[in-house]
Image (cartoon, coloured by chain):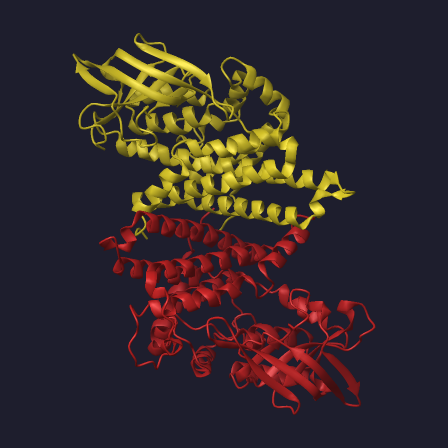
Amino acid sequence: MDFKLSDEQRMLEETVGRLVRDTYTFETRNKILESEQGFSADVWQQFAELGLLGVPFSEEAGGFNGGGAELMVVAEGFGRGLVVEPYLATVVLCGTLVDKLGSDQQKEALVPAIIGGETRLSLALYEPQGRYEHNRVATSAKKDGEGYVLNGEKAVVINGDSADQLVVIARTSGAEDDRDGLSAFLVDGNAAGVSRRGYPTIDGLRAAEVVLKDVKVGADALLGAEGQAIDALEDSLALGLVALCAEASGAMEVACDQTLEYIKERQQFGVPIGKFQALQHRMVEMRMELEKVRSITMLAACSLNESRELRDKRLAAAKAQVGKSGRRVAEEAIQLFGGMGMMEETPISHYAKRIVMIDHHLGDSEYHFGRLESLLDVE
Amino acid sequence: MDINFTAEEAAFRDEVRAFLKDKLPEDISRKVKEHKRLGKEDTVRWQKILNEQGWLALHWPKEYGGTGWSPIQKHIFEEECAEAGAPTVLPFGVNMVAPVIIKFGTQEQKDYYLPRILKSEDWWCQGYSEPGAGSDLASLKTRAVREGDHYVVNGQKTWTTLGQHADMIFCLVRTDPDAKKQEGISFLLIDMNTPGITVRPLITLDGEHEVNEVFFDDVKVPVENLVGEENKGWTCAKYLLTFERTGIAGVGQSKAALAHLKQVAAQQISNGRPLIEDPHFRRRLADVEMELMSLEMTNLRTVAAAEAGGVPGAESSFLKIMGTELRQEITHLFRAAAGPYALPFLNEALHDDFDGNYVGPEFAASVSARYFNFRKLSIFGGSNEIQKNIISKMILGL
């Protein structure tokens, strides 16, 4: 048992930490949020130069060969700075899916381009009627000569508005919620028949509603075997959950730190409000929730190589805890900041929004409690 | 980073498991698992078995007969004992007064008391709280006045856990009433058979006789029973707080209780189906399981920090709050699982020798009593509010 980071992991942590501290200031981030594509191409290039875009890829492919712990370290750093760049979409979800399912040719075409920062991808998975169920897919892919024709709608596709390519999960066979029959396709973001309605999200990201109407793709667009995408998809979603939990952990840490600093400074009735026991105890409770999230995120990050059931149980518990504890920390942070916590100009409000809304990415606490319930007997 | 036990740690765990399987008396573990009330002789019998193995004095240095175990080993041992249904070792002697004697006591005190504690020859209790000194312990009033080679002690202690069995009590007493609160206190060891001591039972809301009042009326205590210097008793009391308290999280106890709760919920019927399939109940189980996973990892992080040489201080306060809240929540779910059969209260049915008929399922006999009894967890050992004050001050700097 050892909770210390390895030298390599510590270097990674320092790299991300320095980048976030030095260049990703609150003001810089605000400018990024106002930009049309909602992230900074410069920052993305820095990620590439520092090797961050290669974290989950093998060393042969030019990556860092990182696992759950490495991803955790990176995402925590991003959470501390509320980084909005499309790391989760491009690297964690799509990158690892391509790496897992793709042919040598597909990987050669895409992985170095992802690692180098030249290509950004987005996972078009969830649908308007499917909420967080990743196997409830009505979007169809029908054989058309050598290739396929795709039809359907994809909901709240994170970074789908600006992605060069979409990884579309479509049904090649089976009923709407079958696990079998799901296939992954690479679709150019500007392909004929693809329409994307981009919009901002309340937590500082951008997303799109994507409509696929008779979108024709070649046989080389299919990733992996037809109808067999589910396991690899779940592996990538598992990594995505670790990244989100870690991001929440990093953001919650800063929210706690900023709130603590504020109640030590803010004077009322002639004393810092942190002298009041009612607020002290609330502050302690915030820190306790943070510790729980830190702990269970480590558990999740270290469980990716366990059996799928045990992995999924722990991931569900972690994401449910993040939802429950995150909400508490965010609400308490705003409360302790008082009116200042309500202001857009106060950084804490941005942390609170991101922490709360992480619950709506890749399944909320209700959804994950449900998964945990179904896995309750797994040891 | 690796959350799994190393091969050595796993081997140690297996050794502990084998020992428990071999040596933990079945009648005792059954009582613990079925939440029957334990008697003095159960605890003493188990402590003697542990001592024979050399595994009683977890926190003592090896030279005094302690295990010399690392924080991780102690953690593994405590977890395995809890999961196997071993009774809790009476902490007052082996885990509380002994470390103080080892640190501050005279050679004579060490030579006399430590072997007796190891052999469970003395049953110890703790004389800290008073009617007017609870969380504000330093306001204690029990007076000790030096007269020749004796102290004469007058006053009252309360909440004295299992004092009805005690041969010895370690007390915080006021030796200098004019000094500042913490500075006039001394640490005394008092023989419970001394004339002038009266023990009166306090019956708690679950009908149990676990705590007592102890009255001191001109009790003569030899000066050689003073530990450390006169008026430095607060230092001894504080020293105990720096002791590793990772067991305070009670993860092993919660795991065992949750496993039992699942079993019970699989047998109880609700809406024509096993209760464990009831979506509302299952959600609450899932919530407890999730919190337990978070607590266990937080506990392990603290243990690992201690292993690396850190002194767990205020971090233990987090564990105390989280751990006690969780254990209390599980008792609440047991009550929920019993449904209307949480109501009947047959005090005698909580004893192992009960040979009457239960009202409703056997497990239900103890659930409400235990629920009410476990309210104590967030009150004793520094109430959870005091723990929050400690964290505010020591960790948050407020």
- Residue lying farthest bottom? B195
In percent of the image, x 33 and y 65: which residue is there?
Answer: B341
Closest to the observer: A302 or B68?
Answer: A302
| B306 w.r.t. B47: above or below | above
> Is residue A87 left or right of A20 when viewed as pictured?
left
Say above or below: B215 vs B76.
Answer: below
Q: Residue at x 40, y 68 (%)?
A: B16
> Residue B47, how many percent across, how many down?
46, 79
Looking at the image, residue A250 sits to the left or right of residue A245; the answer is right
In the image, B208 versus B244, the foreground residue is B208
Which chain is assigned yellow?
A
Residue that extends furthest to the right in the rendered view of this protein: B178
* Above-or-below relation of A98 to B180: above
So how many labels did they put on this image?
Answer: 0
Q: Residue at the location (78% across, 69% down)?
A: B183
Give coordinates of residue B376: x percent, y percent: 52, 66
Q: Chain B in the picture: what colour?
A: red
**Residue B19 appears in the rendering:** no
Does B334 sit left or right of B312 as displayed? left
Please provide percent x and percent y for residue A43. Answer: 54, 20
Q: Residue at x 40, y 45 (%)?
A: A317
Q: Position of residue B113 (x, y in %)?
A: 60, 83
Left or right of B65 on screen, residue A240:
left
| Residue A190 in the image: above or below residue A376 | above
Residues A171 and B180: in front is B180
Q: Could you tell me if residue A261 is visible in this image?
A: yes
